[in-house]
Image (tube, rainbow, N blue to C red):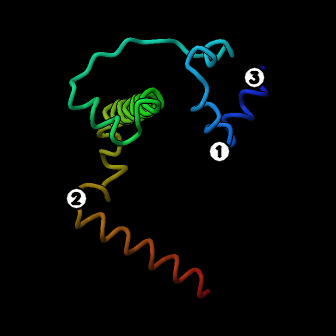
Amino acid sequence: MDDIRQQILRSAQGAALLDMLPCDRLWDMEWDMGRAHVVMADDVLEAIDQLVGERGRSRFLEEAAREKLERLELEKALHATAGIARGEKYGHWQDRKTTAAWIRGQRESQTKRRRS
C-alpha cells in the first residue's frame, strides 16, 4: 500500500485524483494521517477558501503548519548557536569593517594562488 500511495502522491494526476475522492474514501485508503478539528476566525477561513477552495483547506493548512514548524526549528537553532563565533579565534567577525577587510584579504590570497 505504501508504494502505491507514494506513486500517487508523486504524480500531478495522482494529486488531482486525490482531490476528487470523497473524504471518506481517502480515510478508507489507510493514509498515515489524523484528524483535527480546527477553529479559526471567519475572515481567515474565507481567505483560505478564496485561494484554494473548500476542498484544498486541509492541504493548505498542513503546508502552512509545516512551514511554521520549519521556521520554529530554524529559530531554535539560531538561538542555540548565537554568539558561537566570538573570542580571539574569530576576531575577524567582530564588526563589519573587520569582516570586510578579512574577506578582501581571503579573496586576494585566492587570486594570488590561482595566478601562481
Q: Is residue 73 visible?
A: no
Q: Is residue 65 visible?
A: yes
Single out the mark in the foreground, 3 or 1: 1
User: Which corner quadrant of the image does residue 87 belong to?
Assistant: top left
Residue type, label 1: Ala
Residue type, label 3: Asp
Front-lying residue, 106 or 1: 1
Q: CA distance from mark 3 to mark 1?
A: 18 Å
Residue type, label 2: Asp
Image quarter in which the C terminus is found: bottom right
- Residue 114: mark in rendering: none
Residue at point 26%, 65% (across, down): 98
x%, y% of residue 79?
31, 33
Q: Could you say whether the residue bearing mark 2 is in a helix, strand or loop?
A: loop
Above or below 41: residue 91:
below
Residue at point 62%, 19% (across, down): 26
For label 1, the residue is 12
Q: Could you say whether the residue bearing mark 1 is in a helix, strand or loop?
A: helix
Front-lying residue, 107 or 63: 63
- Residue 95: mark in rendering: 2
For label 3, the residue is 2
Image quarter in which the N terminus is found: top right
Residue at point 45%, 26% (across, down): 58
Front-lying residue, 3 or 104: 3
Q: Could you say whether the residue bearing mark 3 is in a helix, strand or loop?
A: helix
In this figure, what is the number of numbered marks? 3
Q: CA distance from mark 3 to mark 2?
A: 53 Å
Single out the mark in the foreground, 3 or 2: 3
Which comes sooner in the sequence, label 3 or label 2? 3
x%, y% of residue 78?
34, 37
